[in-house]
Image (spheres, rainbow, N blue to C red):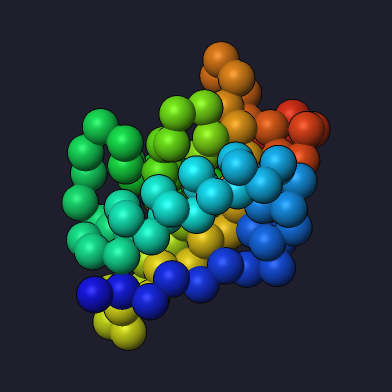
Amino acid sequence: MYTIELTETARTDLQWFRKNEQNIILDAIRQRLWHEPTITNRNRKRLRPNSSATWELRIGQYRVLYDVDSAVRIVTIQRIGEKRGNQFFFRGQQEDI
């Protein structure tokens, strides 16, 4: 089992969402990343090389970008946002990853 940590940036991203959205996102993180976070499936994929994170978790319209350190079994959540079309939005602002 993996330990899940949120960076300060991810915590700030999460606070931007309404409380019920925060609960949906946090529940999905706990359920889907606690065990085997590096197994690709329809809601979890490896990203192309970028400066944000290595992996993406899809939760409906929400996206969680994270890195995994398999040696110490830690999942580090880097960013939490929304995906509209082909664009990522963090705290309501479009950003490239």
Q: Is residue 52 visible?
A: no
User: What residue sits 78% from the left and 33% below the top?
Assistant: 92
Residue sticking out furthest to the front:
20
Is 7 located above or below residue 53 in the figure? below
Residue sticking out furthest to the bottom:
72
Give residue 5's position: percent from left, percent from top: 51, 72
Q: How many marks?
A: 0
User: What residue sits 41% from the left and 36% below the top?
Assistant: 58
Rendered-image quadrant of the C terminus? top right
Residue sticking out furthest to the top:
85
Q: Quadrant of residue 56?
A: top left
User: What residue sits 53% from the left and 35% below the top?
Assistant: 62
**Left or right: 21 with respect to 72?**
right
**Left or right: 89 with respect to 57?**
right
Rendered-image quadrant of the N terminus? bottom left
Give residue 48's position: percent from left, percent from top: 42, 40
Give residue 83's position: percent from left, percent from top: 57, 27
